[in-house]
Amino acid sequence: MPVTTLDPKPALIVVDLQNGILKLPLAHPAADILARNAELLAEFRRRGLPVVLVNVAGGPAGRNDLGARFPTPSPEWTELAPELDAGAGDHFVTKHARSAFTKTGLDEWLRARAVTQVVITGVATSSGVESTARDAHEQGYNVTVALDAVTDTNGVAHDHTIARIYPRIAETGTTKDILSALADTNRDPQSTF
């Protein structure tokens, strides 16, 4: 479903745009994804809306068919991309699972700020972003995904998630659509939550 509107108190959740992941081969140029995220971040910050910057620093210990385990990454690998211009007003979440909601206190933090909608961006479309969107949807948030501000290491997985998964759990649109919806809300750009 295309973006129709944004609630009065949306939060922007940027998933795993960190040095180690951005050095991997991605389906879309990292510079383009970072530029679109920077646009969204600037507008959410300008309007005093909550911004959540997420990085991943490990994974769950359970077995999988690939027999792979998430290695303990170096601090440089987990460091957020400088293009995000992380600041003191942002909320930082370090996760050890695919979803930014798993054992991080993110749900409580958002609810304490009366957030009812989340706009999600980042990497990977079919993993961290999808898991975060699924959890947000199941916890009752309205979910919006900025399709031109997400990418994946696997283009087929990216396309599948956009075509088959997101329509069931989220509204989707471009960065421009979301910025337009923000402008249509006539929110006071200086209000804070």
Image (cartoon, helix red, strand yellow):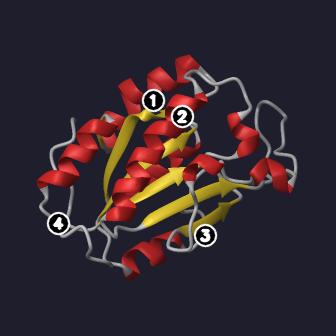
Q: CA distance from mark 1 to mark 3?
A: 24 Å
Residue 119 screen position, x and y as percent = 37, 52
Q: CA distance from mark 1 to mark 4?
A: 32 Å
| Other residues around mark 2 within 10 Å, as few (<14) / some (14–19) / many (≥20) | many
Q: Are marks 2 and 1 in contact (CB under 8 Å)?
A: yes
Q: CA distance from mark 2 to mark 1?
A: 6 Å
| Other residues around mark 4 within 10 Å, as few (<14) / some (14–19) / many (≥20) | few
Q: Amino acid at mark 3?
A: Thr
Horizontally, residue 96 falls left or right of residue 174, namely right
Q: Which mark is residue 187?
A: 4
Q: Nearer the viewer, residue 99 or 88?
A: 88
Q: Amino acid at mark 4?
A: Arg
Residue drawn at 59 percent across, 63 percent down:
102
Q: Amino acid at mark 2?
A: Ser
Q: CA distance from mark 4 to mark 3?
A: 29 Å
Residue drawn at 84 percent across, 43 percent down:
69
The image quadrant that residue 99 belongs to is bottom right
Mark 3 or mark 2, which has the lower sequence index?
Answer: 3
Mark 1 or mark 4, which has the lower sequence index?
Answer: 1
Q: Which mark is residue 161?
A: 1
Vertical relation: 18 (above or below) 8: above
Mark 4 or mark 3, which has the lower sequence index?
Answer: 3
Vertical relation: 125 (above or below) 136: above
Residue that label 3 marks: 104
Label 4 SS: loop
Q: Nearer the viewer, residue 113 or 190?
A: 190
Q: Are marks 3 and 2 in contact (CB under 8 Å)?
A: no
